[in-house]
């Protein structure tokens, strides 16, 4: 149920197989509400995910997070008090298997703390692992990208990260932090639906 990393091997008649490493991830449940916590050296950013608005993106994000795709990747583009972008293995210089999936349009307003998927394809529109956190209202972006969720805690952490020194637009890659900012881990947890009773403490 909780998943994990496992080694599988067998032995019979004096013959032993090679060891196969597998990873089992928790099954995604579309009836649940999910929250993601991004850990960085500057603190944690907590995001409520909008599976009712963007079910494809949220499932992909949750599955990739459970698989460890985001762990150790970089926040590779920052614009002070505007946006920060992370979650790309290519931009982090890391080879890692990710999924590509259709983009979903949303009419939700893009406000401070909105988390959008960073498009990776235009025809047809497609998303993958990269995401961006918007740090100020951007009404002109409404309907232009898939809305993944909303920061509910740690917006101050995201803004602090966005203000770090970067290459700006003077050298490529543009707006890359001068010092690497690592996403140490992304942890997914289920959260009660609005109005649902909390579990008793035990």
Image (cartoon, grey):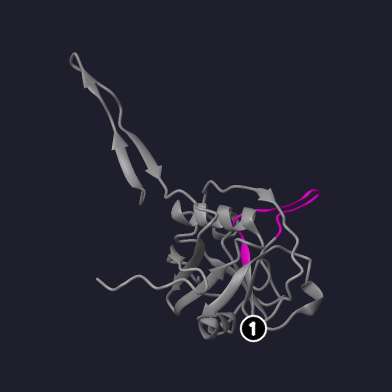
**In the image, which residues are magenta?**
119-131
Instruction: Judge whether residue 182 can be spotted in this image.
Output: no
In the orientation shown, which residue stands out farthest toward the top?
Answer: 13
Spot occupied by residue 147 in the image (x, y as percentages of width and height): 67, 66
Q: Is residue 124 located in the magenta-colored stretch of the structure? A: yes
Q: Give the left or right position of residue 181, taking residue 79 as reference.
A: left
Q: Give the left or right position of residue 45, taking residue 170 as reference.
A: left
The image quadrant where one finds the C terminus is bottom left
In terms of image quadrants, where is residue 21?
top left
Q: Is residue 99 above or below residue 178?
A: above
The foreground one among 12 and 59 is 59
The foreground one among 20 and 66 is 66
In terms of image quadrants, where is residue 43?
bottom left
The foreground one among 162 and 22 is 22
User: Which residue does the image show at 45% across and 60% down from the upper left?
Assistant: 71
Q: Give the left or right position of residue 39, taking residue 14 as reference.
A: right
Spot occupied by residue 93 in the image (x, y as percentages of width and height): 54, 56
Spot occupied by residue 67 in the image (x, y as percentages of width and height): 45, 51
Q: Is residue 202 located in the magenta-colored stretch of the structure? A: no
Count neighbours of disc 1 (C-alpha within 10 A) and say few if under 14, some if 14 to 19, many if 20 or more. some
Q: Is residue 44 above or below residue 127?
A: below
Q: Give the left or right position of residue 142, taking residue 77 as reference.
A: right
User: Which residue does the image show at 59% across and 59% down from the upper left?
Assistant: 91
Spot occupied by residue 42 in the image (x, y as percentages of width and height): 45, 80
User: Which residue does the image show at 78% across and 72% down from the upper left?
Assistant: 141
Residue at disc 1, secondary structure = loop
Instruction: Judge whether residue 135 can be spotted in this image.
Output: yes
Where is mark 1, residue-wise? 80
């Amino acid at each position: 149920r909780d998943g994990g990393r496992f080694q599988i091997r067998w032995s019979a008649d004096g013959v032993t197989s090679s060891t196969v490493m597998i990873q089992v991830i928790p099954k995604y449940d579309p009836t649940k509400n999910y929250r993601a916590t991004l850990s960085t050296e500057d603190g944690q950013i907590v995001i409520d995910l909008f599976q009712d608005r963007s079910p494809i993106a949220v499932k992909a994000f949750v599955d990739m997070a459970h698989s460890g795709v985001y762990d150790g990747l970089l926040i590779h583009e920052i614009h002070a008090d505007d946006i920060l972008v992370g979650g790309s293995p290519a931009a982090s210089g890391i080879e890692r298997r990710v999924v590509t999936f259709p983009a979903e349009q949303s009419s939700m307003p893009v406000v401070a703390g909105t988390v959008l998927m960073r498009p990776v394809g235009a025809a047809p529109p497609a998303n993958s692992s990269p995401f961006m956190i918007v740090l100020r209202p951007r009404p002109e972006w409404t309907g232009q990208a898939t809305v993944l969720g909303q920061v509910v805690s740690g917006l101050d952490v995201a803004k602090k990260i966005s203000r770090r020194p970067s290459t700006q637009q003077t050298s490529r890659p543009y707006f890359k932090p001068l010092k690497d900012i690592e996403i140490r881990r992304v942890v997914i947890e289920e959260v009660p639906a609005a109005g649902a009773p909390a579990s008793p403490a035990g």
